[in-house]
Image (cartoon, rainbow, N blue to C red):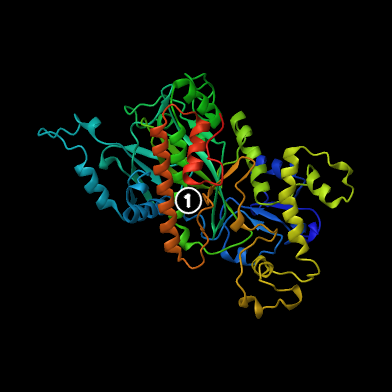
Amino acid sequence: MFEECFGEGPFIFRLNDNGAGPLLLTQVCLERGWREYNSENGDHWNLWWRTSGFSVSHHKSLYAWQFINHIPKGSAICRKDNLVRYLRCMKKVYGSIYDFSPDGFNLPLEYTKLAAECSKCRPFTARNDIDLYYEDKPVWICKPVAQSQGRGIFLFRKLSELTYDSNTIVQKYIEKPLLIGGYKFDLRLYVCIPSYHPVTIYLYREGLARFGTDKFSLNDLKNPYRHLTNSSINKCGPGYTEMKDRIGAGCKWTFRQLRRYFQQAGISDWLLWQKISSLIILTLLSHIQQVPQTVNCFEFFGFDVLIDSTLRPWLLEVNLSPALGNDCDADRTVKKPMLHDMFDLLGLPLYNTGLCIYHIWNDDDENKLVEEDQKRAIKPSQAVVNAAGRWRKKHRKMSARSISRSKSANKVTKNNLNQNNLKTYNYTNKWGNGKDWKNAPAEEGGWIRLWPMNSRVNYNNENMSVNSKVKFMVSEVNKFSKVAKEIFKRYPAASECQLNEFLQQKFDLNRDVWIPPI
């Protein structure tokens, strides 16, 4: 049965087109008992992980036992110009709830708007001495659309300092970030989207705080180590190996380390994390209308969020296929368990430590040895095996889309399934391994479901248009944000556990409140 679910032979993973990929990802796949793809395998692979996206034709040709790590049209927000445009449109429609990203301009198209904005910011005195009042001008940050890892980014005050030779965005620079030991930092949060229809969003509990390696100062805009937090830049800086004030050596902390610092510094951060979870949902809602219904594919995003001196979170960008490098202890602490938990969440098999799968197949009940965590691990495996049974005696290959429809047909036997009657029934998009995201688990390992939020509302109403669903979901997130603020203000002396309980009861959450560990 297991072979019918994931194909004959071993579970095979494929990295990019040339077989090259992050070493950490390869290690995790091998630890799960998977085998690496080679050219002799032909089209027999189970998981294809690519840094870049797939064409729609790739998805259409998937078999039930094949999975890819991108959703067609599901990563539009990872282009900086698209993100600025989408969030601006949502802000016009829904108002201040979308005021979590710095104002931006897409160049060259919106150059005149940028010039007009620059001319009215911080007007000069009657003397109009540009050089004398240079430091009174606001700071802008320029980011090339097609670059990543901090390449091509620079800061400027005067419009005459702006130069670009490709599509670029210019945004207002957050001039008062929260500092630790005088160093600027941002947050890298990991988000998994197994489905846009229905909308299903997971956020990992752990993450990374990434620091600049020179102390922050607006007097020196040309030093990237003061202003950019990309680890690909800062690990090459002269201060990377130095023992920095409060930070130590390197440029990364885990969220656990960050929260312990907040605790020591007397910073109450509970509401901050609830604002961040709302920010992530709202960002993803900005582009779901263009994403088609899909199966057997998922998105894995890296959200970069900056915290200012008032503990207000600002979305900087969304990264497609976030870096899975293994440069320091913080990387190893966060990324390896995150990948294992994500593959468990998606229902992908575990061989060499998969005692739960062996236990299901074995009729001998003498080995009921497992502890509580192993018992919980049986549940997804049972779903896999049950799903496999529905494909018994199917000798021809069917696409993942066709199989997902055929499994969910109402009162249809396998003998009368054919291309003509597939349209007769009301189908749901189940995955080839039996995963049904209309019944998404509340958590898996460190992954916590952000959306859907609660059980009191039917978020999958088939009679609602996509626009109506988005409007409804934005209103729900707005209610959630207001309830969280109200609770935080009303119970200033409450512990984190108490605040979580109040929020769960008040908003009828059927999941844990997402907050990093401490």
Amino acid, disc 1? Cys
For the question of whether residue 38 can be seen, the reply is no
Coordinates of residue 437 in the picture (x, y in percent): 60, 57
Residue in the image at 72% along x and 57% along y: 45
- Alpha-carbon neighbours of circle 1 within 10 Å: few (<14), some, or many (≥20)? some
> Can you say which quadrant of the picture contains the C terminus?
top right
Q: Is residue 32 left or right of residue 139?
A: right
Q: Is residue 49 above or below residue 409?
A: above
Coordinates of residue 477 in the picture (x, y in percent): 43, 49
Q: Is residue 13 above or below residue 240?
A: below
Q: Which residue is mark 1?
A: 78
Residue in the image at 43% along x and 57% along y: 472
Q: Identify which residue, 253 or 244, lies in the foreground.
A: 253
Q: Is residue 198 above or below residue 157?
A: below
Q: Secondary structure at mark 1?
A: helix
Coordinates of residue 506 in the picture (x, y in percent): 46, 43
Q: Is residue 163 left or right of residue 280?
A: left
Q: Is residue 193 left or right of residue 352?
A: left
Coordinates of residue 213 in the picture (x, y in percent): 47, 26
Residue in the image at 51% along x and 36% along y: 500
The furthest residue to the left: 126
